[in-house]
Amino acid sequence: MDSLIAASARALAAGDSLSALKRIALRDDPPALALRGIAMAQLGEYARARELLRRAGRGFGAHEQVARARCVVAEAEVALAMRDFGGLPRSLAAAAATLEAHADRGNAFHARLVAARRLLLLGRLDEASAALATLDPPALPPVLAAVAELIAAELALRALRTSAAQPALARAREAADRAGVPALVAEVAEACAALERPAARRLDAGSERVLRLDEVEALLASDSLVVDACRRRLCAGAASQPLARRPVLFALTRMLAQAWPGDVERERLIAGVFRTRRPDETHRARLRVEIGRLRALIKPLAEIEASARGFALVPREGRDIVLLAPPIDGEQGSLLALLSDGAAWSTSALALALGDSQRTVQRALAELEAAGRVRSIGRARARRWLSPPLAGFTTILLLPASLRLE
C-alpha cells in the first residue's frame, strides 16, 4: 500500500472524507477507487459510491479475495443507506466468511454488523439479536464497538427493555468518544435522546398524559388492562392478546376502551368501525358477529357486556383500563416512522419493512403526499420517498417489529 492510499484510509477512518479525496481523487487504480467510493458514501453520494465500489471490486484480481470481499461489504453498507434490501444477505455472508478465513476479523465483524442493521431496519428483531449475539463488542475496534452497542440498544428499546438499553447506550457513547468520528458521536447522542422524549400518550378517565419509554414499560408491567394502540394488542401483566392482524376487532376494542367505564352506542360503533353514516340491519348483524369474535379472543382478559344502547368493556379481576395511544394518530404511523429517519426509501423497501404489499404502501404514500406529509424524488424505478423528521417524540413504538414482546 503506497503512502497516499494509507493516508487516505486513515482520513476515512477518522470520518474526514474530504481529506481522503484530496489524496486519491484523480486515481483510477482499484484501491483508490474503493477509497473514493467510501468517501463519496460518507458525503451522501450513494449512487456514485456504489458505482466506484463495483469498479474497484472488478479491478481486483482473482488472487485478491480479501480486497474484493471488503468492496462487497462497503457496497452492502451503501445499499443499506440507500434502503436497497435486495441481494444483500447471500453476498454479504460470503464476504464475511472470506474475511474471517483470511484473519481479517475487523472487516468480518463489520460485515456481520451490516447484516444485523439490515435485519433491524426490516423489523426482524429476533434474527438481528441472534446475529449480534455472535459478536463480542469489547473486542472490536471503537467504531465497530459503538455500532454494535447502538444495535443492541435499539433492540432493547424496540422490546421495551429500557434498563438494558441504558448501559448499551453508555458503552456506545464511550466507544464513539474513543473513535472520535463526529457522525458516530451524533448518532449515539440522537439514540440517547430517544429515552427522554415522549413515546406514547396515556388516555384514561378523560385525561391525557405523555409517557417516555420507561414509563410505557412500567405501565405494561402493571396490573392495568392496557389497550396498546401502538402495537395493537391487549395486555394485562404477563398476559397479552395481539390484534394487529384483526383491524376491525382492534377498532372495536379501542372505542370500547375510550368509553370505559361507560358503554358505546351501537350506531357509534358501526359508524366508527364500518365507516358508514347510514347503518342498516346488515351492519347491525355484522356488528353482533364481530363483537362475538372479540368476546372469544379477549375472554381471559375482559368481557364485553351488552347494554340497552350498546356495549361496554369490562376488565376481569377489577382492573382499570388504560388506552396507550401512539404519539401521532392515523393509519400511516409506522410508515411515517420509517420515513422520518432521513433516508430515501423505495416503495419496495417500505413494503418489506412493513410486511405489506407494494400496492398498499403506494396508496398510503399517495394519501400522505396529498396531505403534504411526504415527498418523492426521482421517477419510475428510481423513485424514492422522504419525510421531514418527526420532532418532539421518539418513533420507537411506531416502528414495525416481529419480536415477540413479553
Image (cartoon, rainbow, N blue to C red):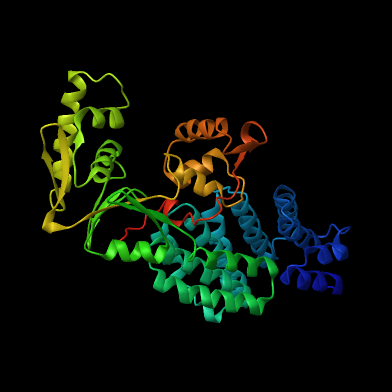
Residue 224 appears left or right of 318: right
Residue 104 visible in the picture: no
In this orientation, which residue lies closer to the viewer: 209 or 220? 209
Quadrant, the N terminus: bottom right
Which percent across, then down, holds residue 38? 72, 60
Residue shown at 27% from the left, 41% from the top: 250
Q: Does 406 sit left or right of 68 as displayed?
A: left
Q: Is 236 in front, or is 108?
A: 236
- Looking at the image, which is closer to me, 100 or 145? 145
The residue positioned 57% from the left and 33% from the top of the image is: 369
Q: Position of residue 13 (x, y in %)?
A: 72, 71
Residue found at the very far front of the displayed protein: 206
Q: What percent of the width, then of the height, locates residue 75?
A: 65, 56
Q: Is residue 195 visible?
A: yes
Front-lying residue, 326 or 4 = 326
- Above or below 358: residue 125: below
Residue 64 in the image: above or below residue 330: below
Q: Quadrant of residue 304?
A: top left
Look at the image and tell me in which quarter the C terminus lies. Answer: bottom left
**Left or right: where 34 falls relative to 375:** right
Residue 364 location, x and y as percent?
48, 34
Specify whether 358 is left or right of 69.
left
Q: Residue at left 56%, top 30%?
A: 370
